[in-house]
Amino acid sequence: MEPFTRVSAVGVPIDLPNVDTDRVIPARFLRKDRSVPEYSSFLFHDVRFGADDTERPEFILNRQPYRGARIVVAAENFGCGSSREAAVWALAAYGMRSVIAPSLGDIFHQNCFKNGLLPVILPAVVVAELRRQLHDRPGATLTVDLESQTVTGPDGAQHRFEVDAFRKEMLLTGRDEIELTLGFEAKIREFEARHSKEMAWAVPARKST
Amino acid sequence: MFEKIWARHVVAEGPGGHVLLYIDRHLLHEGTTAAFGRLARSGRSVRRPDLSFATADHYLLTSPGSPTADAETRGMVEALGRHTANQRILYFGVGDPRRGIVHIIGPEQGLTVPGITLVCGDSHTATHGAFGALAFGIGSSEVEHVLATQTLWQKKPLTMRISVEGRLGPGVGAKDVILAIIAKLGAGGGVRHAIEYAGSTIRAMSMDERMTVCNMSIEAGARAGMIAPDETTYAYVEGRPLAPSGEAWRRALAEWKALPSDADATFDREVQLAASEIAPTVTWGTSPQDALPITARVPDPMDIADPGRRESMTRALAYMGLSPGTPLSDVTVNRVFIGSCTNSRLDDLRAAARVAKGRRAVVPAWIVPGSGLIKRAAEAEGLDRVFVDAGFEWREAGCSMCVGMNGETAASGERVASTSNRNFEGRQGKGARTHLMSPAMAAAAAVTGKLTDVRTLGA
């Protein structure tokens, strides 16, 4: 996984609340391997492109200088709905490194951490102000710094955010989570030995089929 | 209850309040096949194939023989068959009468029982919480993590108790209850929470109805939703093929009876609803929170003070092709879908059949049972005859028109009365317009051709 330390980049404001992951990537693309070169075009596909796949000029990512954005500044409950990790893959394929919002869909939030994308939760008023600045000054940049847990807005104001110590460490190092967990093998085995006695009924009585 | 289950599954403590949580059941479907590929490429194998179970539901067509629409999706289903065979995972595949929607067959086979942790790479996994299990949806990376380690790093969520009290009126069911709850909480109201549904209304529900309620927890933002187990739960689980039996059953039952939340249990948030205030409900917009009683009118964005919310409503109405002030019962539909992990169980089919009986569908209407076994049970009761005689199409089990990924979609601009769980833009096909409702209400829409208060049909 690509580590995340500090990113300074153009921000794109997305004002609509409750942007669901079906909108981030429509279901018909979920069968596609994420390594295909056109993967980034699946991002927001049905609101980004019209009939015969031409760009819709009214969609913000189709406008310069937002086209080059690497940071999404979203509204409440961005990434709600389906658990599809492809929503994060499509954002990452486009080049997005961070999503800032007042709240995020829980599963989307977790999926971000697994793919080197930093989810940042800030108060609704702060996020609304960041979006306003990005509208007023198209192409304005923000800086997201994980080490110091700060977002610096286009106006230079710094906003501190909270991030779990565990997730912070994983993102800073880009460490493989499964590798880390396999280091707990002794503990898992110990737990299983105890659990299989205390909750023996929890193992399905599977007959060989 | 949440705390009790959580505490029994902590393998290790990590930094920042994260724990390594043990997973008792891992359910898989062909949409999660990619995780097997990554696992194999990294040279890892499935740690506990005996706790992993798979079926094919998302990408199959629900026409006879359950084929796939194209080579690409056929490849995904076949890959799942290969991976599960290699890893010795029990697979309810094509041709197996037990095959069906993953959240339907877990409970049906007795895999879903109280007190366990259960995950699946699907956001509607909270369905299994209806048994008093801690069940939640996970992403593809987490699927791979569970396959490799049978654990997940998790941070403890906040808790919320939603109490619904009183008796539901005629024509009002579990779907109306959960739509009313989502409308009250908002689509993001349950974010970072595990919900416990409680109260006399919930207690009076069958397991099929409780699963409908828990199923849509994610539509209020909550990853997990649960209901304390009771006699209704035990009666459902006892004797299921993979449920505990004999001495294991007696031990399990003793533990399950201690699971419900203690009288002095506290929750981070408490919400109350009165059953008497819940009417047959339909959605008018593009978020499940956009739900109103069928007797209401399409809302007017001009009545909304908040500019963001107003713009969002304007956009939703434009997509849905609706004008403010229109009575919801005047809205005509082009198609009806009765199915999905929300509403494809036997109770749902019975409710729809009561409305369909002796009437005639005036628009194309599909009935998609949740599993092969539900299909058989419904046929044994003669429900298939009721539907076919009323001009409905009786189909094979699968996710079908709920997910818009298998080839079964509505056309652009078509309006669908649907018992599924999401009315997002494009969910049932690019440009398709979805109105969510109960099976009885969907059947009523099928026989009248418009959104209809099922109570006016005397059902």
Image (cartoon, rainbow, N blue to C red):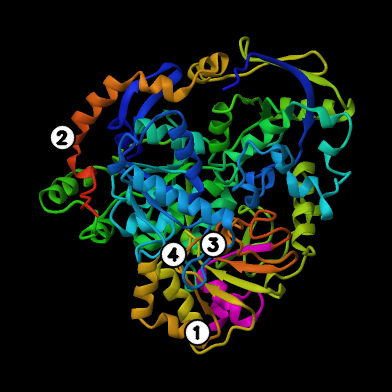
Q: Is residue B137 magenta?
A: no
Report which residue position mark 1 lands on.
B388
Q: Amino acid at mark 4?
A: Gly
Q: Amino acid at mark 2?
A: Lys
A1 vs A130, left or right, is: left
* Residue drawn at x 14%, y 45% as measured from the top left: B251
User: Which is in the foreground here, disc 3 or disc 4?
Assistant: 3
Secondary element at image label 3? loop
Q: Amino acid at mark 1?
A: Val
* Residue drawn at x 63%, y 13% as measured from the top left: A5
For marks 4 and 1, the one nearer the N-term is 4
> Do callouts 3 and 1 mark residues in contact (Cβ within 8 Å)?
no
Circles 4 and 2 on the same chain: no
For mark 1, name the chain.
B
Vertical relation: B84 (above or below) B406: above
Report which residue position mark 3 lands on.
B68
For mark 4, name the chain.
B
Q: Position of residue B291 (x, y in %)?
A: 62, 58
Circles 4 and 1 on the same chain: yes
